[in-house]
Image (tube, rainbow, N blue to C red):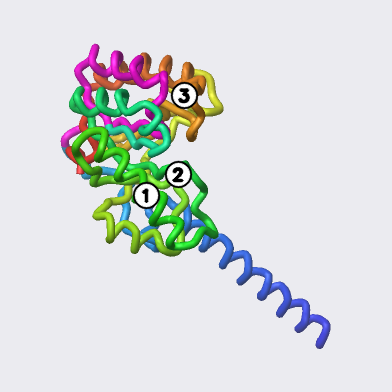
Amino acid sequence: MRAAAIALGAAAASGLAMGAVAGMAWAVRGRSSQIFGPSVSHGTPGNKSIALTFDDGPSPATPEILSILAQYKVPATFFQCGVNVLRAPELTRAVHAAGHEVGNHSHTHPNCALKSPSFIHAEFSRAQDAIAESTGTAPSLLRAPYGVRWFGYREMQARLGLRGVMWTVIGRDWALPAPAIADRVLSGVTDGAIVCLHDGRGILKDPDATPAIEAVRRIVPALLGKGYHFRTVSQLL
């Protein structure tokens, strides 16, 4: 009896530990989690509108994506890294001048888990300054690298006046070929969706974003053909 009780107690403790780990993982990376700061992952449905977003730019791939968006006259939101902005401020200005929205994606694209509140604030503050200097407009939105939020994130958002944005569907365009990226996005889009793609790879100087570019060539006309309207994230919300 005593051995059985001990075994049951150990199992219960193990279950609680696993539950705690799962709960923490959701708090850090869950798309709908508000634990570490307010964020959104979906707009209000009703107008058949969606927001196309691009992370990790600007990069040499950005102009080609801008060209596709201009061809179809659709707006997008670009979450940019401060290091990349400082490296190519003319690309950030081109994004802004074309009528797209520029959001904050940190300075060096770190995984913020286990980082100090001061580190987290410095990362987004530096990116905020770089983007504001390039475009003349400070971002009002941010997206955490890897979708990871942590202690101090909420305070940083409040101090910088930034609203967190996650996503409804992510293309996994860093790992998949263009047809698979497009299929993943097209099958996951719903009214009010926020789509996450990439025009860069962290802070790499010259990343290969060819799969993402080719996927965008498929995604945009396909969604327009289905009657969707494209908005920036701020317009969608």
Which is nearer the N-term, disc 1 or disc 2? 1
The crowding category of the residue bearing disc 2, from other C-alpha atoms within 10 Å (few below 14, some 14 to 19, many at least 20), is: many
Q: Is residue 82 visible?
A: yes
Secondary structure of residue under mark 3: helix
Question: With 169 as the anchor, is 2 left or right in this view?
Answer: right
Q: Nearer the viewer, mark 1 or mark 2?
A: 1
Q: Which residue is mark 1?
A: 124
Question: Compared to 202, does 120 lie above or below?
Answer: below
Residue picked out by circle 3: 181
The part of the chain drawn in magenta is: 47-76
Q: Looking at the figure, which quarter contains the C terminus?
A: top left
Quarter of the image for residue 79 reads: top left
Kindly report the distance in space between the C-alpha atoms of the residues bearing marks 1 and 2: 11 Å
Q: Give, as a three-letter code, the residue at label 3.
A: Ile
Q: Do the residues bearing badges 3 and 1 touch, measured as CB atoms within 8 Å?
A: no
Residue at which label 2 appears: 145
- Mark 3–mark 2 distance (CA, rounded to whole Å): 20 Å
